[in-house]
Structures are given as C-alpha cells and as structure tokens.
Image: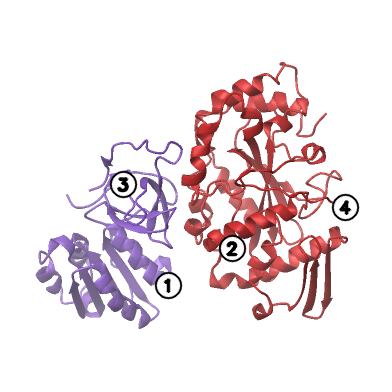
Amino acid sequence: MTINFNDETFYGDFTFRNSPKAVQRFPFPFPEDSYMYSVNLEPHKSYRPGSVYERTFDVDEHYVAEMKDRARVLADDPLRCQSLPHMTLAGWDLVELIMTAKAEEYPDLFELHRDGDRWRWINRPLGIDDTFTFLDETTLPYGPMEYITRQTQGDFAILDQRDDNLWMDAGMVTTQADWSLDFDIGMNFFEWHAPVPKAHEMGVFVRALKFLLNIQQGAPARRLNWTMTINPLLDTSPENYHKWGAMKQELTAENVGRMMHLRVELQTLFRLPRSNALVFPIRCYLIRLEDLVTVPKWGRRFHRVIRDLPVELATYKGFINNRPKIVEWLSKYDDGAPTSPGIWPD
Amino acid sequence: MIETTITPSIASRPVYSRLEPRPGKAHLLVADAEGAEAILALAEVAPSGFFDHAHVIHIRKATASTYTERLRGLKPAQFYSGPTYEAAVPRLRRTLLGAHMGLQVYLAGTESLMGQAMQEAAQAGIPYGAIQAEHRGSTARRMQCVHCKGITEDVTTDPFVCSHCGLHLFVRDHYSRRLAAFQGVRVDAEDPGNIPEPVERFR
C-alpha cells in the first residue's frame, strides 16, 4: 500500500484537494435523510477495507500537509497544546498506542523497534528517526503527547477519569470546530459541552458520559460528528475567529460548490492502560460540496438534511445566514428519488 | 437587596448558594465589598467559638469602611481589611500554604473575587467540596478575550471593548474555573464594523 501525499495548504491560497479516491472514502455522516443529535457510538473495529474505519489511526493523502499545518498553527499559538502536570503518564500511554498501531498497520510508513525501554521510532513520511527512553521525557524533543500528536492527524483531548466524571486535562487542538482548549482545559464533561444547544435537555450527555466511563482497554469506540466550513480551513478556532469569520460573507450562489465544505469529525475513544485516562482523537475530514455531490446519494441526502435542520443547530454550527444559498445550490442535485439506508455510496 | 439571583444558564456557568457553617478545624473567609453581608449572616447562625479558628479577609473596594468594624466585631482569630484583591493575594497565598486538612473555605461577593480565590484554593490543593461561595453585590463579570487572552475586569455591558486588544467582544456564559473568567468573543467577526449598541446587562 502506498500513499501519494499531497502538497497542499489549508490556509492562504487553500490548495487543499481530495483525489477521486479520497472522495470515495469520505466519511459521509448521515445514515438517513434527516439529522438530530444522538449518542451514536459503536465499537471502533476494523471495517470495510479502504474506508476510514479500516485502521486504528487512519493515515491518508493529506497526512504530510496536515502535519505542516499543525506546526504552523503551534508556532503562532503554543497554547493549542497543553497538558496539566498530572497528565504526562497519559501522554506516554498515547505514544505507545499510536506507535504500536501505526507500525503494525502501516509497516511501509512507520517502524517501531523496542529493546526494553529503549525505543526507536521511524516515521518515513515525515523523515523522523528517533531513539528515546520510554517514560523518560528528557529523551524526547517535546512532551510525549505533543511529540506523537505532531505526527498524527486529528486533534487529541486526553480525559482524566475521577469523581465519576471526565476532565479535559490535556490536549493538542489545532483543527477544531470552534472551541478553545486554552479556555476549556480543566473542565469536566458537562462543562466543556455546556455551549451545545438542546443536547443537554435531551439527556445526550448523561447517557454518553455513562458509556464513556465504562470504556475498557482494547475496546475503543467511535462516532461521527459534522459541521460546515467556508474554505478548507483546518484551524477554525475561536482564537482566530476574528480572522476567518468574515470569510463567510464571501459565499455567493456561484462559488458555493468550491468554497463550502462539509467538515466531518471521526471521533474515537480509547482507554489508556497506565493512567486509566481516555484519549479522544477528533479527526477532521473536509470535502467541498462540488466533490460531495459526485456521489448522487450524498447529494440528494445532504440537500434534505441541510434544508430540514432545526434553526438552533444551523445557528450553532455557524451557517444559518448562508443556509439559503447552500440549500439552493444543493437542490440542483436532489431529484427527489429515494435514498438507500446507511452512509456508503450505492 | 444585596443577595444576587443567577438566571439559570448553561452547565459551565457557576451557581452559588448561601454560606453555611460547616464543621472544620479552621475557617478561611474571603469576601469583597457587599460580600461582607454574607459573612455577617453566617455569623448569626454559626456555633459559638466558630470565629476562634477563623481568618477573615475583606476586600473593601467601593464599600470603604462600611463593614470593617462589624467584621472586626466578630472577633476572628485573624482579620485583614484591604483595598483590592491584588493587594490581598500574597496574604491569601501564604494562608493557603499553611493550611491543614480540615480547613473550610467560605467565599462571598463578586464572581471575580470568588473565582480568583477559588483558583488559589484549588491550586493549594483544597478540594472543591470544602469551598462554599455566595454571590453578593455587583454582577459585573471578569472576561477573558478568546483572541488576545487578556482579562478585562468589571465588565457591565454586552458587547464591551477588550481592555487589551481593543476588539469589541460579546459576553458568553461559558465559564472557566481555571481562568476564573467568562469568555468574550469578537461580536463583529463575521461582519467587521457592524457592532451593536452596548447594553448594560450587569451592574
């Protein structure tokens, strides 16, 4: 298996593109023609070869460019990566989880050689060959969580478990849908979800927390979440909202297909062995609407979902003002035909 | 009426209740301005001898000497009356450093005072379960600008101007205990220059 890594940007000139193969494997998040919150967690098991569900940590054609974008964002704002002092052990747990999974599942890209606590890690796409002592921070150029998440796509929140709650006590967050790690670090599960409308009243978070507290080692879980983003911006942070927010005004009936992107998060959850923390990777996939509608089922369904989405959700997801333009554009790809159940292309 | 009612809001927005005397080896009471009223009310229901092991820290702010003599009259083992929170911080930190298991902490007054003192107590390892807080007096907010990270104290209007970067920010109810601040976000981010008239929401 070889991957041709794209040379592309997620800011400025926005040269990000999905190849036809990447479009076909895009994690379209709607199993039916309408959307409402649900806990929708399922076991994170290998499923459908070639899909984003095949491997523990999906590596795709955007890997190298995404890691460059992360380095750029961190240089601008080091507060995007923080770990409270008691979370270092969980960081090492994460190093082990990611290195062992990637070395096993992508042997041509990553290698891990372990001799007791002397580890050698080879990351071919990024040109890294490091030898270090496991559990000794002084042998890595960054803290363990930062080291490995500078080499892994997706944001990462590490959740400490105590007092029957989860506490967001560490994270690497540079590709987020408008939430601030720097503000939310140290909060519990209900506090950091506080701004989400409706879901509290529906009991979604109480049920989700109960599930998460019981996740066992070796039995990770996953779900999809989504929003929409103007331009292929990975970094839609509140910190930079005053820079990207105004781009929403640039949307016209003519450029919707190129400028508007469906943003899908593949969220997974793993219990970590030494710290008993949970790690919550939030992997962002972007697709412009022009590419999305090349799958006829997705074009039809997405039109119906966006058209019928409750106002609170369209507001929270940040596209209420642009919804009429988006729905108008999408309607051209909905002939009213019935759609098949499930998320996959027909 | 000095007691403050908080309109129900989102889950990160702190709620407060009446201070009540709890059994403890020692009691640390920190209040600003009208927060003194909550300590005086607590004294009315406290068991005798309560203040023999109490340290009262009062930050006067605009109330000047209004409460000083009445607080001193409670005869706490230690009493401090100071002009501002910043001035009281070294004393507060020293006190928390010397604290033993069984200390009860009582906070009263503005959210800014309670939030910051709670930060200090939490950093000193005092469990949240041993800290009570009662809101009294001004509802002005301590706001963090999510863009420049600067803190603006005593915010009464929405939107308001960040005292550090000058952006016009709207006031969210999202609150960080770690920062002891609410979050402010640029109000005209999507339509630069379109700034609504500030409304006085807090006083």
Q: Is residue A275 visible?
A: no
Q: Residue at x 42, y 58 (%)?
A: B149
Q: Colour of chain A?
A: red
Considering every residue shown, the one lying at the far bottom of the view is B98
Q: Quadrant of the C terminus of chain A?
A: top right
Residue B6, compared with residue B131, is above or below; it is: above
| Picture quadrant where residue A296 is located | top right
User: Residue A220, image x and y in percent?
Assistant: 73, 55
**Mark 1 to mark 4 CA distance (whole Å):** 50 Å
Where is residue B32 shown, x and y percent of the image?
22, 64
Between marks 2 and 3, how big is the CA–CA gap? 37 Å
Q: Which circle's residue, 2 or 4, is located before the other in the chain?
A: 4
Element at label 3: strand
Tell me which residue sits at (27%, 58%) in the image: B110
- The disc labelled 4 sits on which kind of residue? Thr
Q: Is residue B21 above or below residue A118?
A: above
Mark 3: amino acid:
Phe
From the image, state the color of chain B. Answer: purple
Question: In terms of secondary structure, where does tag 1 sit?
Answer: helix
The residue carrying mark 4 is A2
How far apart are the alpha carbons under marks 1 and 3? 30 Å
Q: Which residue is mark 3?
A: B160
Amino acid type, callout 2: Gln
* Residue that carries the numbered disc 1 in the rendered image: B123
